[in-house]
Image (cartoon, rainbow, N blue to C red):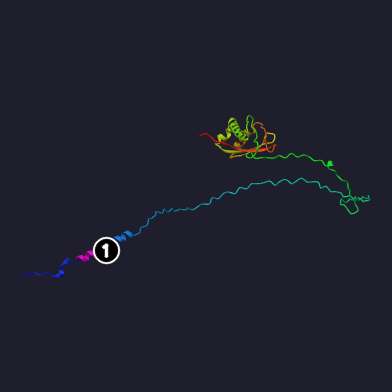
Amino acid sequence: MELKKNPRANVGRNSSLFFAVGLNVMLLLTYLGLEHKTYDIEAVKIDVLMLEDQFDEDIPITIIDVLPPPPPPQQQVVTEVITIVEDVADVEESVIQSTEIGQDDTIDDREVGIEDVAVEDVEEDIEVPFAIIEKVPQFPGCTGNNLELRACFERKIQEHLQKHFRYPEAAAELNIDGKVYVFFLIDKYGNVTKVKSRGPDQLLETEAERIINLLPKMEPGRQRDMNVSVPYSIPINFKLQQ
């Protein structure tokens, strides 16, 4: 007897369909799991303030007896007596003469000669910059032409700074350093005048001016065969050694 299998009882006939459905469901669940957003929950600490009943303390009232101030001393009232004096004296009025010239006034036609006019010679203090002067100020010990005198002047200035340089003790203790620009004028007599400075601190400026004031007297600079004043500036660097 041949056995016949019911086609409805065949389990494997829709296996591919079930596999595709299951695969799509798993992919959907995986996608939802990856795209699901989570948020960090911050812990919030809540403090509870407990207020207890406050009891008002009765403060006793202190009464201080203050004596009244003494009465002011009685001042004597001075009565001013006004005496009426009759004005019997005659007052002479002063006449003020006018200083304006009128038509009836005569004008002095005196001629003034040239010899009657006093002319005073006023010496002009001409300043010529160091870079363009015909002959620079001559430092003691420098010789040669203008270029040699210029180079010797700058070299002698540097030697003078190194010789007389002294770091202020107060500035060293306060750790103050920096660059000070000193301006001075070599006048037409060869003297160093009008020393001014500009720097980070007053202590350094004072020391820089002291060094410049020690410069010797020089032969003044010349421009067009006449002595002129020459301004000059130089930086002095104050630096602490670490």
Q: Is residue 90 left or right of residue 175?
A: right
Residue to which mark 1 is pinned: 25
Residue 113 vs residue 206: left or right? Answer: right
Residue 161 percent coordinates (x, y): 59, 32
User: Is 25 inside the magenta-drawn segment?
Assistant: no
Furthest-left residue in view? Answer: 1
* Left or right of 45 in this view: 178: right
Q: Nearer the viewer, residue 159 or 135?
A: 135
Image quadrant in which you'd find residue 144: top right
Q: Which residues are magenta?
A: 15-20
| Residue 130 position by quadrant | top right
Q: Secondary structure at mark 1?
A: helix
Q: Position of residue 7 (x, y in %)?
A: 14, 70
Q: Main secondary structure of the magenta part?
A: helix
Farthest residue to the top: give it: 141
Residue 19 belongs to magenta span:
yes
Q: Pinpoint residue 152: horizontal percent, then vertical percent.
A: 60, 32
In the image, 113 versus 164, the foreground residue is: 113
Residue toward you, 138 or 179: 138
* 239, 17: nearer the viewer: 239
In the picture shown, does residue 111 fall above or below 16?
above
| Residue type for callout 1 | Val
Q: Is residue 70 above or below residue 236?
A: below
Q: Residue 121, position in %: x, y?
A: 77, 39
Q: How many marks?
A: 1
Asked if residue 185 lies left or right of residue 15, the reply is right
